[in-house]
Image (tube, rainbow, N blue to C red):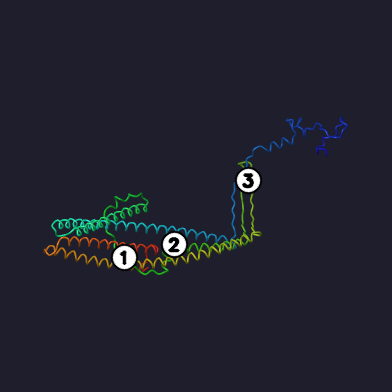
Amino acid sequence: MPPACRNWGPRRAIRASGWARRDCSRCWGGAGSGTGQPAFLVGIGGLTQGTDLYQVGFDASWELDLFGRVRRSVEQAHAQVAAQVARQGDARLTLQGDVVRAYLQWRAAQALLDLAGEVAAARARAVVLRAFQRRLGLADGTDVDLARAALVRAQGQAAGFQRQAGQALNRLAILTGQPPGALDGPLVAVRPLPDPPPRVPVVLPAALARLRPDIRAAEADLHAATAGIGAAVAQLYPDITLSGQVGQRTLTLGSLADWGNTFYQFGPAISLPLFQGGRLRAAIRLARARQQEAALAYRQRVLDALGEVEDALVALRTDGAARESDRAAMASVTDRLALARTRYRDGTGDALAVLDARAELGGAGQDDIQARLAVLLDVVALCKATGGGWPEAGD
């Protein structure tokens, strides 16, 4: 077909059919364009040049939460945050308990090491006296061997307490974020073990749920899983969103504020889950399964907490009774040492009886320290099992 321009026509010089160009200033450069190119090509070249476009405005959208999807999602997010905060509290409680345990073990090892030194000194003097008696013919080699064996046992106990003290101090330094050996100077002074509390109140299960951070974390997980079911169910229903946009658009910066350059749009948007029924219903089943799992985990966490409290109370009662027995034994050995010293001063007893009583008193003191440490560790375990303490009677 011939071109649309009427300046094109059949060439008469050529007999074959066809079309040829006539001189046209509108289509082919010539005097009209001055470029030697068609005028329409010149126009296209102008469109390819850069153009500045100035635009200001704002847009906003609001989702109509008709079926509670956003509300339940926000509720789920808040519950998840609460669970993480509770877990942070549980980790802090565990760290505090470990620090207290390491400190008590360090102080107990210090006291045991001090008593072990006294026992070893008494056993060493007994070996000297037994050896002297053997030279005088008042004792035989068996008595000397027994005294030396007692000395070796005392020295071995001292070495064991020294190892316990070093390990407890290193563990305490690591738990406080310091390298091993950093606390050798500040904690080198010997301090006595604190006394256990005189009375431990009975902790009710309701108080446990309020005090223990791990139970609060499990409860928050259950809350989040329950809210997740509502969010998953709301996915079955359509989403309606209202959105709008207002602004100014112009090619020149000076006319940006002209009212004629204003543009705006406003309208609703609806999203319908038409072809996702299977996926969404599977998501609902998954959310319900997670909620059941969280419920079982919460129940198990409460049962474990009750068991930990009961175990700590049983240990506290039994270790407390054992400590009373050790204290009675220590009082008996103290009376025996006083009697041996009295007889030695009166000339009716010998120095070996005094040394044996002193060694036995040191051993009884070691038993008392270990019993007190066991009671204190039971108190720490009970504090941890109750969430860091227990409410007072007026709380």
Q: Amino acid at mark 2?
A: Asp
Q: Do residues under tags 1 and 2 come within 8 Å of each other at their CB atoms?
A: no
As measured in the structure, the alpha-carbon distance from the residue carrying label 3 to the one carrying label 2 is 57 Å
As measured in the structure, the alpha-carbon distance from the residue carrying label 1 to the one carrying label 2 is 25 Å
Packing grade of label 3 (10 A; few <14, some 14-19, many >=20) is some
Residue with the mark numbered 2: 214
Nearer to me, 206 or 269: 206
Is 331 situated left or right of 348 in this image? right
The location of residue 323, given as percent across then percent down, is 29, 66
Work out whether mark 3 precedes mark 2 in sequence or the reverse, and give the earlier one: 2
Callout 2 secondary element: helix
Nearer to me, 225 or 5: 225
Query: Quarter of the image containing the N terminus?
Result: top right
Work out whether mark 3 precedes mark 1 in sequence or the reverse, and give the earlier one: 1
Nearer to me, 23 or 329: 329
Dividing the picture into quarters, in which one does residue 41 lie? Answer: top right
Is 281 situated left or right of 138 in this image? right
Q: Amino acid at mark 1?
A: Pro
Regarding residue 191, the answer to whether it shows in the image is no
Residue sitting farthest toward the right? 15
Work out whether mark 1 precedes mark 2 in sequence or the reverse, and give the earlier one: 1
